[in-house]
Image: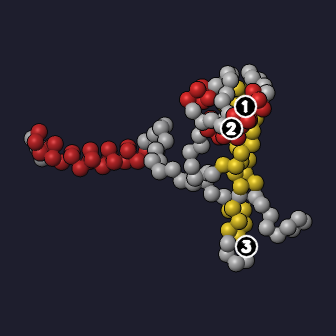
């Protein structure tokens, strides 16, 4: 049986589609799939007998430097804020809500009692952030 070029193309099309589909199934992407939705990092430590979940507490340890003078929110606190060492590593520990994006410089400034404004933000350099997740024990000590 002799096939002309048009007949050969029509006959080969389903085979080509099948091979392309098979090859696509074998292909493995190096780039991960992007999940466009931020999901809260909620960790349940345990579920109480009444069905209530005991959630973990999330804390951040923010290591930072003060590189320039900061302005205090309250004028009376300015001398104490000025006494905090500059150009040396410092840290604070703060509670964190895993359902939000953390503004680290604002957290540092608020913790120190400094005004959250552009000049104060420039004077803070965040160098590292560590975190901890702690499960509270609703049963009391020893349980």
Q: Residue at x 55, y 29 (%)?
A: 118
**Residue 80 sits in quarter:** top right
Disc 2 to disc 1, C-alpha distance: 7 Å
Q: Residues within 10 Å of mark 2 (few under 14, many from 20)?
A: few
- The kind of secondary structure element at disc 3 is loop
Which of the 4 quarters of the picture holds residue 131? top right
- 15 displayed left or right of 106: left
Q: Which residue is mark 2?
A: 74
> Where does the C terminus fall, quadrant-wise?
bottom right
Residue 74 screen position, x and y as percent? 68, 38
Picture quadrant where residue 123 is located: top right
Q: Which residue is mark 1?
A: 78
Q: Earlier in the sequence, mark 3 or mark 2?
A: 3
State the residue position of label 3: 48
Outermost residue, right direction? 142
Alpha carbon separation for disc pair 3 and 2:
44 Å
Q: Residue at x 74, y 21 (%)?
A: 87
Q: Residue furthest bottom?
A: 50
The relative height of residue 123 versus residue 33 in the rendered view (above or below) is above
One can see residue 97 in this view: yes
- Pointer 2 with pointer 1, Cβ within 8 A: yes
Whole-percent x, y for residue 124 in the image: 65, 28
């Amino acid at each position: 049986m002799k096939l002309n070029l048009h007949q050969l193309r029509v006959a080969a099309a389903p085979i080509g589609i099948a091979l392309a589909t098979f090859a696509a199934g074998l292909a493995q992407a190096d780039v991960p799939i992007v999940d466009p939705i931020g999901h809260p990092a909620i960790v349940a430590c345990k579920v109480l007998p009444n069905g209530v979940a005991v959630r973990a507490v999330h804390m951040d340890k923010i290591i930072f430097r003060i590189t320039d003078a900061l302005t205090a929110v309250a004028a009376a606190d300015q001398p104490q804020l000025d006494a905090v060492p500059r150009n040396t590593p410092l840290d604070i520990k703060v509670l964190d809500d895993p359902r939000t994006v953390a503004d680290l410089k604002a957290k540092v400034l608020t913790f120190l009692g400094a005004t959250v404004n552009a000049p104060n933000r420039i004077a803070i350099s965040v160098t590292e952030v560590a975190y901890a997740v702690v499960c509270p024990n609703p049963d009391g000590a020893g349980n």
